[in-house]
Amino acid sequence: MDTFQKQPPFISSPANPRLKEIVRLRHRSHRDEAGVMIVEGFRELRRALDGGVKPTQVFFCPELYADAAAPALAEECRQAGAQLIQCSRAAFEKIAYGDRLEGLLAVAPQMRLRLEDIRLKPDAIVVVAEAVEKPGNLGAILRSADATGVSAVIACDRGTDAYNPNVIRASTGMIFAVPVVEAGTSEVLAWLDRNEFRIIAATPRAPTVYTDADMRGNVAIVVGTEHEGLSRAWMERADLAVRIPMLGKADSLNVAAATTLLLYEAIRQRGLGR
């Protein structure tokens, strides 16, 4: 760690009170109260910095580094204003959230964006995810949203915890590349109306197959959970309901897989990606 201007504090014991505070941030109520998120892993922290996130603390363990550039990334965080805290392996394992230990864990402010902060592209696509609670699903949706150039992902239900550490990891850090907004249904519907979006609702009961739908122009692709589906509020306001053909015994796809199919159909119709 020769790049550091001064020796950072060192935590050897897993019982250190400072680590207990980090463990508390595994719970949404504590993260929301503090207005922070946990960013764990080299790739995720790299993309957080690239997305303009400024960590306040970075806990690191050289013994667990999975990338040769990890020391330089930690130093970059320090130069951006973060306090560096070195941990023993046992201490770092105490605060690590996932099962893939890479020796880097940061605490950073949550990115609280509003609908008005979304910069819309021409023929914009937004994803509205209603009540998508599983972190892996939301993270996968964010990866697909980044891959297809989506303007924003709107989490339209407070049951969706966009800053769950597993969402950040499942998105491979794409939560820092795609604007994510949390807002209520009525607020989102009004915003879509002001910006002249057509609402395309995904539901297994729709008569129209998704490849037959016109997805050009400003469109909002609205998805819900496999179990509950979309609420009446969204179904009543949808300009078009579409379904994905199911030829087996299952009646619906995983919500992230369904979202990916719809997004790629939308950009295919725009002639993009060729």
Image: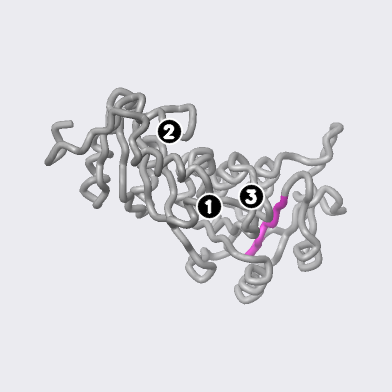
- Indicate whether 212 appears above or below 191: above
Identify the image's colour scheme: rainbow, by chain, secondary structure or one colour: one colour
Rendered residue at 43%/33% (across/down): 96
Q: Quadrant of the C terminus?
A: top right
Residue 175, how many percent across, how many down? 48, 49
Q: Secondary structure at mark 3?
A: helix
- Left or right for 177, reference 10: right
Structural distance between the alpha carbons of marks 2 and 3: 33 Å
Q: Are the residues flagged by discs 3 and 1 in contact, CB closer than 8 Å?
A: no
Name the residue type under label 2.
Ala
Q: Secondary structure at mark 1?
A: helix
Residue occupied by mark 1? 29
- Left or right for 227, reference 4: right
Residue 41, how many percent across, how many down? 40, 35
Nearer the observer, disc 1 or disc 2? Answer: 1
In the image, the segment drawn in magenta is 216-224
Q: Are the residues flagged by discs 2 and 3 in contact, CB closer than 8 Å?
A: no
Structural distance between the alpha carbons of marks 1 and 2: 19 Å
| Residue nearer the viewer, 36 or 271 | 36
Name the residue type under label 3.
Leu
Other residues around mark 2 within 10 Å, as few (<14) / some (14–19) / many (≥20): many
Nearer the observer, disc 2 or disc 3? Answer: 2
Identify the mark at residue 96; answer none if there is no mark: 2
Residue 87, how many percent across, how many down? 29, 31
Other residues around mark 1 within 10 Å, as few (<14) / some (14–19) / many (≥20): few
Identify the mark at residue 263; answer none if there is no mark: 3
Q: Secondary structure at mark 2?
A: loop
